[in-house]
Image (cartoon, helix red, strand yellow):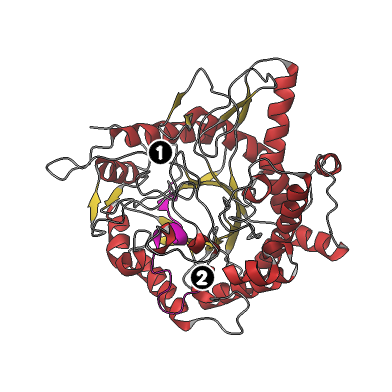
Amino acid sequence: MTEFPKNFLWGGATAANQYEGAWDVDGKGVSTADLLLGGTYDKARVFTKELKANAYYPSHEGSDFYHHYKEDIKLLAGMGYKTYRMSVAWTRIFPNGDDAEPNQKGLDFYRNVFEECRKYGIEPLVTISHYEMPYHLTEAYGGWDDRRVIDFYVKYAKTLFTEYKDLVHYWLTFNEINIGMLFGGYMSLGLPVKDGAAPFNGEMTDEDIQNNLQGLHHQFVASALAVKIGHKINSNNMIGCMIAGNVNYPLTSRPDDVLKAQLANEINNYYCGDVQVRGAYPHFAQRFWDEHNVKLNITAEDAEVLKEGTVDYYTFSYYSSNTLTTDPSKADAAGNFSTGVKNPYLKYSEWGWAMDPKGLRWYLNDVYGRYGIPVMVVENGLGARDVVEKDGSIKDDYRIDYLKGHIEQMKEAIKDGVDLIGYTPWGCIDLVSAGTGQMAKRYGFVYVDRDDNQEGDFSRTPKKSYYWYKKVIESNGEDLENK
């Protein structure tokens, strides 16, 4: 008997700012992502207020999904996808964010995409905001720090719910919303940064934490209002949250290490999860605020909205785990977005990410035990360099091994009693990395002929993993062998 439910949502995931391209086509406005230069493992991406001539802005072309969507969706259908997680570019619908009317060409484009998905029986799973708010809202309002942005977002979300009422039933309000409290001041919250600065907060001051958490609170309110409106427009809508899943282990059984790991899991995972699923801030929030001199403006009406606008299901990304210690003599783990020290029991990718399938099982049990609502893994994957062989094939056995290990642990979590409803590995067709802006860091089942020098014709080629994942879906997760 299969461990995966019969109606399990197998699929893959992308984001508009990393994949779509056509950044200034058909009335699309400038997003925060459009002003980020490409970087590398060693060189951070930076924000430029004005576009630099002959510089590489990864979002401008992405993988050119805008002009390849029919071909790409057919490729996804060829693997047997049940769902496709994608995001809508806010600036394609409201170019400035505060426009009176939506951009009709943007609405038409996504209608065509969703209808193409439906043609193949693929259920669209749509992220409303994925790291690309209109830059005008950053410049004119200071991003999510301004309460007025709530209304702009709600108008945008209501437009999507209304326009695609009969085409989309699975929605996510914000991508990895907890990045806003970790280091994503510009990327996640659209908070202004200086010209030439990195888009991620490094060491955060108390003032940074205050600004980020106030902006995040406004996102919570916007999300809750969107949930309420989405349910009103179509009672069949399933509207979820999306968290960057953090698994933090203590390096040793020393109580200080254990407490450090516990606090990291609480702050990284539950602070946002509790607000969006339970409708209120968690018990540990007040101490965290006090220790960082945070004074949030939370109205009585906000508290009521948060209570009423809780999500229907919980989704998250999971790539790797972290290992933490209070011992200052231990070296930090090298890796973009990884924190802590190297775990001696795990292998690491070229980009410094720990490969830890069992951490996914731990996380699934942890969040399902806390919240008791359906869960979905909506990002998971291995960023790696792929080599095109002389015969044109791409033998990405390392990706198959990574995904196989994680699917096996999802099976175990289902046996444990977790209500897991879907799996959409990240970057199912190659796209540019959010962290580094590189195309070289590939995740896909399908190779896109484009590189970091902006060379290549964007042609698509299925990799070995494409045919493996097709078999996995056909067997509903039973046949994981790499033959």
Residue 83 image position (x, y, % from top left):
42, 56
Query: In terms of secondary structure, where does tag 1 sit?
Result: loop
In front of the other: 266 or 195: 195
Residue 392 image position (x, y, % from top left):
15, 45
Question: At label 2, which amino acid type do we have?
Answer: Val
Question: At label 1, which amino acid type do we have?
Answer: Leu
Look at the picture and state if 361 lies above or below 376. above
Look at the picture and state if 92 lies above or below 307. below
- Magenta-colored stretch includes residue 132: no
Mark 1 Cα-neighbour bin, 10 Å: few <14, some 14–19, many ≥20: many
Q: Quadrant of the C terminus?
A: top left
Residue 144 image position (x, y, % from top left):
69, 62
Q: Quadrant of the N terminus?
A: top left
| Residue at the image point whose x is 25% and y is 45% from the top | 463
Q: Magenta residues, as a range?
A: 6-30
Q: Looking at the image, is mark 2 or mark 1 nearer the viewer? A: 2
- Magenta-colored stretch includes residue 18: yes
Q: In the rendered picture of this protein, how many numbered marks are placed on residues?
A: 2
Q: CA distance from mark 2 to mark 1?
A: 30 Å
Q: Which residue is mark 2?
A: 30
Residue 172 image position (x, y, % from top left):
57, 59
In front of the other: 14 or 204: 204
In front of the other: 268 or 157: 268
Q: Which residue is mark 1?
A: 382
Query: In terms of secondary structure, where does tag 2 sit?
Result: loop
Q: Earlier in the sequence, mark 2 or mark 1?
A: 2
